Image (tube, rainbow, N blue to C red):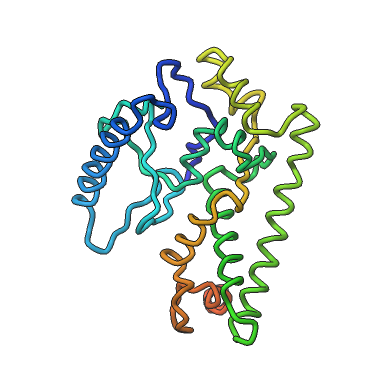
Amino acid sequence: MASTLFIGAIRNLNTISRSDNPDFDQANEEFQAAREVFIQNRKARMHNDEELECEKCTIAMPKGYHVHHIDGDHQNNKESNFSIRCPFCHLCEHIGWVGKNRKGVIIYAPDISQENLNLLLLTAYCLEFSLSKTSKDTTEYETLEQLVLQTQSVLKAFEHTKTKVLRNYQTNCPADFADTFLAMSEDEYQQREKNTFYGLRLFFYPDGFKKEIEMFANSIFQISDSRKSNPLHPSEWLSRASIFQNQKKGIER
C-alpha cells in the first residue's frame, strides 16, 4: 500500500470547524443528515458481508468511522467532499487540534508509513485493553501479556524518536508544526513531506481515545467473545501465526 497520508493542517482560511460555528446546532444537523446519506450510498454499493473501510489505512470498521471534509470546509457537505477515515487517519489532517488537546506527539519514523503506524498503534492499544479485561487465571492471559509486552517495546522505540524531533526542530508538539504549515506557501506545503519535514509521523497517545479503543477492541478484534476458537481474538494470534510459519517452512523445503 503506497502511503498517501502525511501530517497536515487545514489551510482553507474561509473555513471554521463545526464546534466554532455560532450556528453550531444547524450546521451539525445539516452535516449529520448529509453524512447519513453518504454512508448509506456507500453501503449500497457494497456486498452484504463487507464493512466500511478507512480510505487511508484500509482498516474495516463496522462502526466508529469518521467522515472527513477533504477541503477542510465543514460547511461543504457534498458527497464528493467526504472521505471515510478511522479516527487516527482523520486526525492526521488536523494536527493543530491534536497538539492543543495533547493527544499525540511528532516522532521521526521514515521507515513506516503514517497509515501503518496508525494501524500498529490501534492494534497495540486494543491489545492492552484486551489484557486489562482478561482474568489472570485464564490460559489466554499469558498469551495476551506476551503480545502486549512485544508491542509495547516496539511503540516505546518509536516514541523515543520524539527526542530527535525536539532536538532538530526545537519542538515536537503537533500544534507548533500546524502553525508552521499554515504559514507556508501552497508550493511549500505540497512539498513538505519531501523536504524539511521528511520522515515525521504523528504518534497518538491512548488516553485521548479510550472510548474508540474499547469500541474497536470489541467490534473488530472481538475481545468480548471469550470463545477460544474465535480467530479474531488476540489470544489466537500467536498460535495461528505459528501455523502459517510452519506452512511456509514446508513450502521452502
Q: Give how far across and how far down residue 55 sits, in percent.
A: 39, 44
Q: Residue at x 74, y 40 (%)?
A: 162
Q: Residue at x 31, y 30 (%)?
A: 27
**Nearer to the camera, 253 or 186:** 186
Please determine whether, in this image, residue 157 is positioned above or below residue 127. Answer: above
Q: Give how far across and how far down residue 187 sits, in percent.
A: 52, 15
Please determine whether, in this image, residue 57 is positioned above or below residue 70. Answer: below
Please determine whether, in this image, residue 113 is positioned above or below residue 152. Answer: above
Quadrant in the rendering for residue 154: bottom right
Quadrant in the rendering for residue 75: top left
**Nearer to the camera, 65 or 151:** 65
Please determine whether, in this image, residue 67 is positioned above or below residue 149. Answer: above
22 sits to left or right of 189: left
Q: Residue at x 39, y 37 (%)?
A: 68
Q: Give how far across and how far down residue 107 sits, in percent.
A: 68, 40
62 sits to left or right of 102: left
